[in-house]
Amino acid sequence: MSSRIDADAGEVKNFIFYALGIIGLIYCLGRWIESRPFPCYPSGSVRIRSDIKWLEVSLALFQAELARLPRSLDELAAVEPPFLEFVPLDPWGAEYVLEFFADCDLYRVGTYGEDGLPGGRGDAQDDFGEWRKHIRSTANDSFPSGFSKE
């Protein structure tokens, strides 16, 4: 009987070592995968598109509610009640850009890419949403300071 117990204890030890080995391999594989760039999201493009859409919807809601555009994207989170909990950063840690084209009452949201400068190629390429029309509620309604039509 004691030989049967010893055999069972040996099997339990083997099972524990086997299970710990499998867990260790899974952990190492997870760490390796985590350190690799994910091929389905080149340059964070899916995240950028999602963030831009999220910001565009927030800008449309802000404009509909307050009949004007914010002076910056930070204002979306600063007003009461806020239109965003927080303003997201692009994949490179920079703030998204709110551009105005005052002559045509247009605006757009985007990022200047990895280098943070207009233009560029690859990861440094700019990525902006479509130009959107600023709908004025009154004749006195204007773009934020520095972006007037005159």
Image: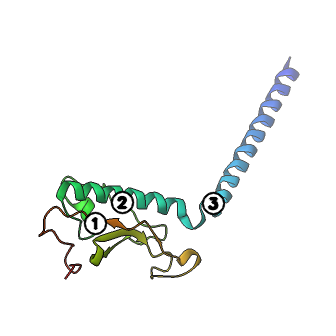
Estimate how packed mark 1 is, as few (under 14), some (14 to 19) or many (20 or more) residues with alpha carbons within 10 Å: some
- Asked whether residue 91 is in view, the answer is yes
The residue pinned by badge 2 equals 55
In primary-sequence order, the first of circles 1 and 2 is 2
Spatial CA distance of label 1 from label 3 is 30 Å
Q: Quadrant of residue 63?
A: bottom left
Amino acid on which disc 3 is placed: Phe
**How far separated are the C-alphas under marks 2 and 3?**
24 Å
Q: Are marks 2 and 3 in contact (CB under 8 Å)?
A: no
Q: Classify residue 82 by image quadrant.
A: bottom left
Q: Which mark is residue 43?
A: none
**Three-letter amino acid code of the residue under disc 1:** Asp
Where is residue 136 drawn, in percent x and y?
Answer: 20, 64
| Residue 83 in view in this figure | no
- Mark found first going from the N terminus, 2 or 3: 3
Q: What residue does disc 3 label?
A: 38
- Residue at 18 percent of width and 58 percent of height: 66
Q: Secondary structure at mark 1?
A: loop
Q: Is residue 93 left or right of residue 28?
A: left
